[in-house]
Amino acid sequence: MSSKPDDISSPIPRREFLKGAGAAGTAVAATLAPAAATPAAAQAQPATQPASASHPPETWLTLTPTEAAFITAAVDTIIPADNLSPSGSECGVAAFIDRQLAGAYGSGARLYRQGPFPKAKPELGYQLELNPREFFRAGIEAANAFSRKTYGKDFDRLNEKDREAALKTMEEGKAGFPGFSSATFFNALLQMTMEGFFADPMYGGNRNMAAWKMIGYPGLPATYREEIKTYFGKKYDKPPQSIADFS
């Protein structure tokens, strides 16, 4: 689940992120919205220059200003603006995470939470007593505490190089979070970032379908099933469509 930056002296490699996230992201879109399945042959293609952030300021549903600042800085470090797409926050990834944490997912509506809660092997999945909203609150607090101890300021106030180094330390489980490993938090943050970047825009992320345009994903599959023969082995050049386009 984790995308491992190879060199903290340069931006987290976008293509390394997409190598694991592209296929997983479209699968996430299918999980969040069953009508949006992965196309048979989606091929990566360069996008045009990213559009500037012209959207209005975010209205946060559950994140505090400190938490929103951390999430925004984190998703922009994982997905920096470049010639492939706008930054993570410009694509609505931070807003997506806020919405998810404010809803049923954040409250742990589908989690068994009766305990006991012993320390378990990673392959057994999430085993903490905290629901996802509480987990992200504790993780952000711990990440900022680690950042202040290491760099003298909160994570969102660090320069790009230090943010990358801080995330790498968290990913390796070396940030010393109380209660759970920093790697557990990093992996959850990375997973949510991928979901927000590739899911259907109706959930708040993937603004303007920037991620879909970047990888050539056509969106709602029922709209192109009759064109499979026409485009078999060829680039699908029509713009993608969201579930919201048909509502």
Image (spheres, helix red, strand yellow):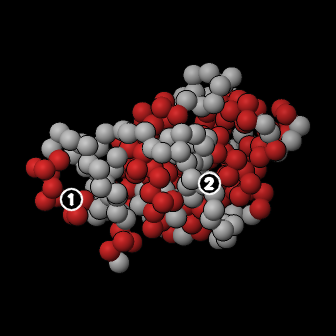
Residue at coordinates 63% horizontally, 62% vertically from top-left? 54
The residue wearing badge 1 is 224
**191 relative to 22 in the view: left or right:** right
Residue at coordinates 57% horizontally, 58% vertically from top-left? 92
Question: For the view shown, which residue lies furthest in the right direction?
Answer: 152
**16 relative to 143 in the view: left or right:** left
Q: Amino acid at mark 2?
A: Ser
Residue at coordinates 77% horizontally, 43% vertically from top-left? 155
Figure quadrant of the C terminus: bottom left
- What x and y, as percent, mark residue 78? 60, 40
Of the pair 232 and 177, the residue shown nearer to us: 232
**236 relative to 245 in the view: left or right:** left
Q: Nearer the viewer, mark 2 or mark 1?
A: 2
Q: Secondary structure at mark 2?
A: loop
The residue wearing badge 2 is 52
Q: Amino acid at mark 1?
A: Tyr
> Residue 180 occupies which quadrant of the picture?
top right
- What x and y, as percent, mark residue 98? 61, 63
Q: Quick one: label 1, few (<14), some, or many (20+) residues within 10 Å?
A: some
| Distance from the alpha carbon under mark 2 to that under mark 1 | 30 Å
